Image (spheres, grey):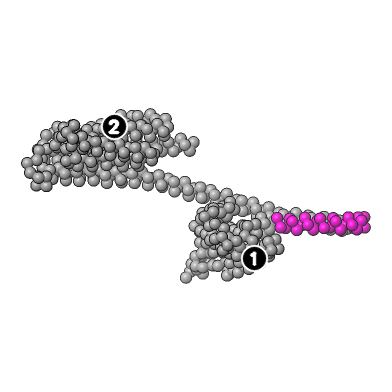
Amino acid sequence: MAGDAGFAELKRTVLKTIIARRITLGVFSAIALIAIFTTHISYLNPLFYAPVVWFLLTFPFKYLIERQPNAGSLHWVHAGFFIAEIVIITFLVNLMGGSEWIGIIFYLFTVIYANFFLPELQGYLITGLIILSYSALVLLEYAGVIPHHSLFPLHTVPYRSLTYNLITILAGAVGVYAPLAYTVRAFTSVYAEKNRALSARERELSRLSQQILTAQDEERRRIARTLHDELSQTLAAVKLEVAALRDAVPPDHRATIFTTIDQAIAQTRSLAHSLRPPLLDDLGLAPSLHRLGEMAEQAGGFRVRVTTDLSTRLPREMEGLLFTAAQEALRNIHIHARARHVEIAVQHTPQRVSLTVTDDGIGFDPHRPPGLGLRGIKERIEGIGGRMTITSAPGAGTQVKLEVPYATDHDRDR
């Protein structure tokens, strides 16, 4: 489906360029007609019928483009049209004075269109054919192999000829650069429309992504609360029931059972904490980070220092996101960093909250992309208008810094 949509968009864009071609060639024809009328040269002069012939060539081209089944065939038809343009333009340039006048300018639109829409190799091919065609024309005229045709007779040097100057201004300057300006604006409009559509799709994907992540956070919170409040209490009740039967259970079996139940309770609470600690919902981010640091010290064998300057609770989603980021950073430090000291700092500045996790471990190549965990957090941070940066170098430790937009009521009032 994506490929079909891309091909349909490509075909629509090329068909829009045909309209742009017809408008620019029509403008040039009108200007050429004015030039012919004001200078009293023949209406059979190629200065007038050259753009008309070029204009007529767009009709069979449009017919062929509309009937192409895939992007490959469309590009080759487009390239074929450019080749036909080169042949016609070269013939007409020969009739309009060759290298004597401004014939080289008439290839300009073909070069622009070819390198704008064709694949790179085909664009270079068309550009090379233009260079070869014009060069061959000039050299063949120079060698006398083909006859030289003047656009109009000159009885003095060109810059002293009013006819030459008027035609150069009207057909050369106005006739080329006005259509060129329109062509560029038409291309800009086409791609501005595509960029707007792409931005709208990105915003929609970001919104859906945030909804999915919010739903995941809510599910993690529900499961963590269930594990902590219900399963832990159930295991504690089982321990009490076993204690009531202590006289019926041999002492060594009773000790084994109590040890197993205590381990299950500890594992359940640890799992609940890893999903979303109840402390985060009850007391907020700062106490949860202190508890996270204590658990990381026990599991990782490094010292963790936590500092915060928060004077108020943050929104629940933001607290969960910052806690998850710190948790993921500590997990990476435990697995990869071989650090001895880690510092977690939370700072609230006007309109922004930042979380920084710094370690003195072995570091890594900063050009290496982050893992899936940090990459997912980075997408979530950017989705709410924040940013995440990772600074590291081999042997120099690592710093993960997150900044999210947020202002307290006091900040807003200032």
- In the displayed structure, would residue 367 be above or below residue 141? below
Name the image quarter holding residue 304. bottom right
Q: Residue at x 18, y 35 (%)?
A: 143
Q: In this view, does 225 lie to the left or right of 247?
A: left
Q: In this view, does 343 lie to the left or right of 61?
A: right
Alpha carbon distance from label 2 to label 1: 72 Å
Q: Residue at x 88, y 55 (%)?
A: 253
Q: What residue type is labelled 2?
A: Ala
Q: Position of residue 362 (x, y in %)?
A: 60, 61
- 317 or 48, which lies in front? 48
Q: Nearer the viewer, mark 2 or mark 1?
A: 1
Say whether residue 325 is magenta.
Answer: no
- Mark 2, residue position: 84
- In the displayed structure, would residue 393 be above or below residue 215? below
Q: Circle 2: is it few (<14), some (14-19), or many (20+) Cα within 10 Å?
A: some
- Mark 1, residue position: 340
Q: Where is residue 347 in the image (x, y as percent from the top left)?
A: 55, 67
Q: Where is residue 166 in the image (x, y as percent from the top left)?
A: 13, 44
Say whether residue 266 is magenta.
Answer: yes
Q: Can residue 126 be seen in this view?
A: yes
Q: Is residue 168 left or right of residue 342?
A: left
Name the image quarter holding residue 91. top left
Residue range highlighted in magenta: 245-271
Q: Is mark 1 on a helix, strand or loop?
A: loop
